[in-house]
Amino acid sequence: MAITAFSGSAVAVEAAPRRRSRIALVLLLPGILYLVLFFVVPLVSLIITSLESQTAPGSGVYQYGFNVQNYSDSIVQYLPQILRSFLYAILATVFALLFSYPLAYFIGVKARRWPLLQSFMLILVIAPFFISFLLRTLAWKTILADEGPVVGTLKALSLLGPQGHITGEPIAVVFGLTYNFIPFMCLPLYTTLERLDVRYLEASTDLYASGWSTFRRVTIPLSLPGIVSGTLLTFIPAAGDYVNASQEFLGGSSSAMIGNVIQSNFLVQSNYPAAAALSIVLMAIILIIVSVYVRRSGTDDLL
Amino acid sequence: MAGGFFAESGADLELKDIHKRFPGFTAIEDLSLTIPAGSFFALLGPSGCGKTTTLRLVAGLEEPTSGQVLIGGKDVTSTKPFQRPVNTVFQSYALFPHMTVLENVAFGLKRRKITDPIGKAHEALRLVELDHLATRKPQQLSGGQQQRVALARAVVNRPALLLLDEPLGALDLKLRRQMQLELKTIQNEVGLTFVHVTHDQEEAMTMADTVAVMNKGRIEQLGSPEDLYELPKTAFVANFLGQSNLFTGEVASSTSTSISVEVGGRKVVVPKARAQVHEGTVTIGVRPEKLTLLAAEPTAESGTNIIGPGRVVDVSFSGVSTQYVVEVPGVGAVVVFAQNMSFGPVVQLGAQAWATWTVDHGFGLSDHPEALTTDADA
Amino acid sequence: MSTQEALALGLATTAKPTPAPRRRIGLGTWLLPTYSVMALVFLLIPIVYTIVFSFNISGKSNIAWNGFTFANWTNVCDQQDVCAAFGASLLIGSISTVSATILGTMIAIALVRYRFRFRAITSLLIFLPMATPEVVIGAGLAAQFLSAGVPKGIGTIILAHTMFCLSFVVVTVKARVASLDPALEEAGRDLYGSPRQVFLRITFPLLLPGILAAALLSFSLSFDDFIITYFNAGTVQTFPTYIYISATRGIPAQANVIASAVFFIAIAIVVISQVAAQSRRKRLGKTP
Ligand SMILES: Nc1ncnc2c1ncn2[C@@H]1O[C@H](COP(=O)(O)OP(=O)(O)OP(=O)(O)O)[C@@H](O)[C@H]1O
Ligand SMILES: [Mg+2]
C-alpha cells in the first residue's frame, strides 16, 4: 500500500549495488538537479534572506547585509512561540504514541489470525489521509466549540467551569496536532509490530517475565524502529505546523506557534528576513533534536 | 511463585485427559501421562504429531481445550507461563535479537531476582563452551551455537521441569554426543525432570529412562527403551522404532502360554505374554536381526518358528551387517539382517531360503488388521 | 523407575472427569479490542462529520444542522470558487505526480542498481526534504521565487509539489526495486534480451505496482497540501487554500461534497488494490 512508504527506509533490504555505469548518471541527474534547484538553492536563499537588512528603516525594501542581528532579534521577540512550538510538538508526539501503540499492537499482533479484519482496521487508520486535513480540523473546531456537544457535556459534569472553552486554548491545539498526526505514528508502529515474532514473547514469559516485564523488555525494544520513525514523522511536521494553532482553526491569541509567526512575517508583514531567520532556527533545532534522538535510541541505520 | 531460589529438585509432571483442538484441527487427543520427578523422558514421533503442542501445554503457552496439567502435584492448568517452574528450549531457539548472548542467558535469572545473575550466566555459557562469545548478538552466531545458547538460557534457571524441543537437531554428530552427555550430567547433578522431544530415535533410546512414541496426537506406547524395542504393541511403534517384519493371520490354536497363528501355510507361535490379542485375526511380528537365514529347509522344532521357502530378491551390504529381502509366497517380503560373520553372503541372490527365529522373540500387536492396511495405504 | 510402574502410572486412564480449565482473563482478552474499536471510532469522527454535513441544507456557513438534502451533491458547481479550486488542485496534482514519479523512479533504480560516488550525499539529499518542516520548504521556495522575480501562480505550485513528492516516490519505489530479484533481469539478458527489451518487458512490469503506489501517494500528498502551497500560490486558489481562506466566513457544503467524493474514491482504490493483492497472493499460494 502506498502509505506504508511513510514507515521509511526500514522496509527495503538493500541489495549490494553492482554496476558502475554511465546509465546511473543519466538516471540520477535530472532528479538530483531538480532537488538541488528547488530544495538546496531555496535553503541557501533562505539563509541569504535571513541576513538581509532594510535599506532604510520602515522602507520595506531589503538588501543583503550579513545582518546576524536578525537572528537574535527574532529569537528574543518570538521566544515564547518557539518554546511553545516544541512543547506542543513533544506533547502531541507523546499523546499520539500513547494513543497509537495499543491500536497498532492490536492490529499488528492480535489481529493476525484474521487478515480481513487486519486490512479493514488498517484502512480505517489511514482513512483520515483521504479527507482534507483542513476540513477535518474544522470539523473538530465545530465539535469542540463552546456551543458544541463536548463543552456542553463537560460543563454538565462540572469538569469545565461555566466560562470554560476548549477551542482557542492550548489544549485544543495539542489535541488537533495529536489527532492529525496519529496515522503517521500508527503506520510505522504497525509495520514493525506486524513483523514482531510472538515466539520472543513466549520465550520471555517462559523465562519468568510477567506481562508487563515482557512488554517493557522485549516488545518495546523490538518495536523501537517503528517508535523512532513514528515519533519523527509526528514531531517534525507538528513542530512546524501552523494550521492547528491559527485562530481560524483551533488556536487562540495565546497559542501561536513558530509556524504562525513565520507565515505572518512572510505573507502578511512582508518581513522576509525575520521569517527566514525563524525558519532557519526551526530547521536547525529540529535537525539537532532529531540527530541526538536517533543516536540515543541506537537506530542510526534508520537514516 | 516464590522467586529468588532455584528448584531444589525436579518435579513430577502429570497430564490428565488432555485434549487440544485448534480451529478445525485436533492436535492432541486424550493424552494422559505421568512423568516421575527426576526422570529423563523422551517424546518421539513423526513431524506434526503434536510433540511441540504437548510441550507448549506444559509450559503454559497453550491452554488445553479440556484436561489438567499438574506439576509437582499442583494443578497449574490456569497458571501463566512465567509462574510455572518450567523452562523451554524452543525448537526455533527464540533468542532475543536485541540482547547479547550474555543478556539472553541472564534474562530469566534477573526476572526472578536471583543473586549474581551475570556470574551464573557465564557459568552456564562455559558449560556449553560459548563463554568467549558472550558479548555477541544472536544473529552473529552459527545455528549450532544459537542452539547451545538457547540450552544455556533454559538450563541456567535450574527449573523443576526442563522442556527440550529438539535441542540438538542442528548440531553435528560429535557435538551432539557431547551435548547429550552434558545434558545427562546436568540432569543427574540437580535431579531435574527433563522432557525431551526428538526425531532421533537413537538419541531418545540412549538418553531417556522412559520413551513415549506419539502418533497423530496420541501416545501409542510408553516404556523403557528396551521394552519399546523388544515388545512394540502397535504396528506404528514396531515400524517407527527400527524395522519389523509383520504378518497377519488367524489364530489357529492356543495353549495356556502361547498362541499359534496361521501364516503362509505354516504355524507361527507367539507367547501369550508377548501378544496383545489372543484370538481372531491378529498381526504378529519379529525384528529382522532376530531372524536366521538358511539355504536348506530346517527341521521343525518346538521353540522355533519357520517361514519359507522364499526367493532372495535383494541383498545389500551395509558394513556391520547384510540385509536380505526374501519374497515368500503368501506372506510377502521378509527382511533379514545377518551379521557379517563370514566372507560373502550366506545365500545368493535368487536362491531359495528359509528364515527361522526363536518363539520368545516374536510379538503380537494390538492393531486391528483392517486399521493396519488403511494405515499402510496412507 | 521400573517400566511396569511407568506403564501403570502413564497409561492408566483416570475415569473421573476433569473440570474444564478456567479461561484466563487478561489485558489482551477484552480491554485491547475494546480500546482499538473506540480508537478507530474516534479517528473517524471528523470524517463522518464532514460527510454528514455534505447533506446539510445550508446557506453560506455550514455549521448547524438544518435538514437533509441531496442538493449540494447535485449542484456542486453552484459554488463556482469551490469547483475552480478543485479543478486547480486536480491539475496541479496530476502534473506534479507525473513529473515526480518519473524523476523519482529513475533515482530509485539508480540507487539500488548502480554503484556511484556521492551515494551517501544523494541519500541525504533525498531524506532531507522529508525531515524539513513544510513552513521552511514553503518559505524557502517563496524566498527564491521572490529573489528570482518569478511570479507566483500555478507554475510555482507545481514546481513546489514536484519537489516534495519526489522524495516520497524515491522511498516507495526503492523498496520495490530492492525486493526485485536481480536474477530475473539476468535471466532476461541470458535469453537474448537487449538492455532495452529487458527493461521494458521485465524490469518495468515488475516495478509497476510500486510505481503506481508512489504515484497514488504523490497525488494524495499534492492534493491535500496546504502549507507549501499557501506560500507559493499568489492569487491561485487550490482546494485546501480555498478552505483556509473561507474558514472565517464559513465553508459552503459543496466543499464537504468534494472532500467526501474524493474520500470515497480514494477508499475504493485502496480497497480494490487490497483485494487484488489478496487474490493474487492466493493464486500464487496455490501453485508454489
Ligand atoms: N496454532 C495452531 N493452529 C492450528 N493448528 C496447529 C497450531 N499449532 C500446531 N498445529 C497443528 O498441530 C499439529 C501438531 O503440531 P506440533 O507443532 O505439536 O507438531 P510436532 O510434533 O512438534 O512436529 P515437528 O516434529 O515437525 O516439530 C500439526 O499438524 C500442526 O499443523
Ligand atoms: Mg515441533
Image (cartoon, coloured by chain):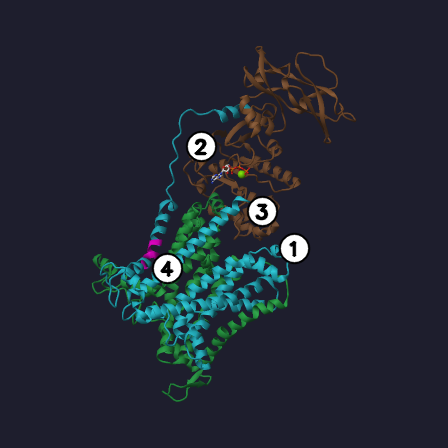
Chain colours: A green, B brown, C cyan
Is residue C102 within the magenta segment? no
Q: Is mark 4 within 8 Å of ligand 1?
A: no
Q: CB of mark 3 within 8 Å of CB of mark 2?
A: no
Report, in whole angstroms, how far the alpha carbon at label 3 lies from the one at label 1: 43 Å
From where the camera sits, is residue C58 visible? yes
Are callouts 4 and 3 both on one chain?
no
> Please, what secondary structure does the residue beneath circle 2 have?
strand
Tell me the distance, in whole angstroms, between the alpha carbons under discs 4 and 1: 46 Å
Which chain letter matches label 2?
Answer: B
* In front: label 4 or label 2: 4
Q: List the residue tagged with mark 2.
A: B19
The residue at which mark 4 appears reads as: C263
Q: Identify the chain of the residue marked 4, using the numbered disc in the image.
A: C
Are discs 4 and 1 located on one and the same chain? yes
The one nearer the camera, B31 or B8, is: B31
In percent of width and height, residue A97 lies at 40, 58
The relative height of residue B78 versus residue C123 in the rendered view (above or below) is above
